[in-house]
Image (tube, helix red, strand yellow):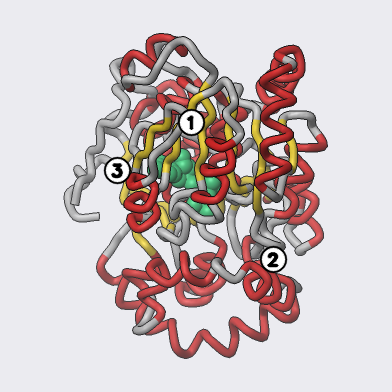
Amino acid sequence: MNKSAPDQARILFLFSDTGGGHRSAAEAIIEALHHEYAGRIATEMVDIFREAAPRPLNHMPDWYPKMVLVPQAWGAGFYLSNGRGRYHIISAGAFPYVYKSIQRMLARYTCDLFVSVHPLANLPFLWTMGKNRPPFVTVVTDLVSAHTSWFNKGVDLCIVPTEIARQHALRNGLPPEKVKVIGLPVARGFCQPEGDKKQAREKLGLPQEMRLILLIGGGEGMGPIEEIARAIDAAELSSGLVIISGRNQTLKQHLELIRWRRPTFVLGFVRNMPDYMLATDILVSKAGPGTITEALNIGLPIILYSRLPGQESGNVEYVVGEGAGVWAPTPERIITALKRWLEHPELLHEATRHARRLARPQAAREIARTLALILNINPSQLASTASVGQSPTEK
Ligand code: UDP
């Protein structure tokens, strides 16, 4: 937090590139802060593993895509550690190894408010700082089945995306006055898209005359994307296919070598996800909370093909239970679901309607305002000439 002006309040976001969702949530809040309070609040993001963990834990963002390749093992880790007592014991065992590197990281930054968007930041940072610290706010980025590590009584405020997540927070010992249901923050482009579907397709060079399916495996391009894409292509549906392989370079290279029968567009990591969601008609995705919430906000019905046991299980129940999507864990079931929606547009419209009903387009802005109030920046000090993406605190 080196270049903030003296009169700027400083917020430090604790996140990690373990998947794409934590970064997206932090960036969405930062975008809203700069839009609402241009020039008054300086922001910075710190990857808690890369910058605050000792070796070899600092490589966690690189390991994460490999670790989730064995979902059963990931699920076992989730369930075994998901209890207040158990998590406390594990943390107490690990703390001696991490607190010095956290201290070193903290010495490099000064801020007036911490915002954690990663479950593993909460307890270690709160323990390291003790009582004499700036306010600390957690923004939970799991929609439903949030792990106990998200919830720590020591925080000043815990912002959750849904009522079910609030219940988890209360069961984990947070007092009701410290828990606020606001929604999961997503970028403005999903909530107030620029233009319409036709314009988005024009901009992206996608065909106008057919339905388009969007296939995504989170920020890391996880899951049997190639198998699903081949099955969709072989089914010879009346639609085209857009595949976003995220940071999975190998997957992208494989996909690019395939001779597709139907119009198929292969991309790597895209920075303009709102354009792709606006341009397409059906999302086929793993049950990542970020991608799901973005799709709900833009009104894109969802077919979910996989979930991480534990943390993403509740997302499937949420989307399916609310009528915004279907669970199709095999390529055959994905094709059945696609055919049903493509052949019965009224069913597709119904799912779209339910997706829109679940949207919380004000979430990022409301979180920004809540943070500003903690910093004693009240609404009368709102900047009148705010501009999106203006960052006063580039390192
Ligand atoms: N994402 C992106 N570009 C890509 C692929 C993914 O910006 O090429 C974003 C996506 O829009 C979402 C996040 O990465 O915000 C993925 O988060 P999610 O919670 O769905 O899954 P995770 O990757 O964290 O498991």
Q: In this view, does 301 lie to the left or right of 167?
A: left
Name the residue located 51 percent from the left edge and 32 percent from the top edge.
214
Q: Mark 1 points at which residue?
A: 241
Q: Quadrant of residue 154?
A: bottom right
Return the disc, 3 or 1, that comes first in the chain's sequence: 3
In the structure shown, which secondary structural element does the residue marked by tag 2 occupy? helix
**Type of amino acid at the residue the image marks with label 3:** Ala
Q: Where is residue 388 in the image (x, y as percent from the top left)?
A: 32, 26
Q: Is residue 296 left or right of residue 387?
A: right
Q: In which quarter of the image is residue 237?
A: top right
Q: Where is residue 382 in the image (x, y as percent from the top left)?
A: 39, 23
Disc 1 and disc 2 in contact, CB within 8 angstroms: no
Q: Where is residue 319 in the image (x, y as percent from the top left)?
A: 73, 37
In the structure shown, which secondary structural element does the residue marked by tag 1 occupy? strand
Q: Name the residue under label 2.
A: 148
Return the disc, 3 or 2, that comes first in the chain's sequence: 3
Q: Is residue 1 above or below residue 239?
A: below
- The N terminus, quarter of image: bottom left
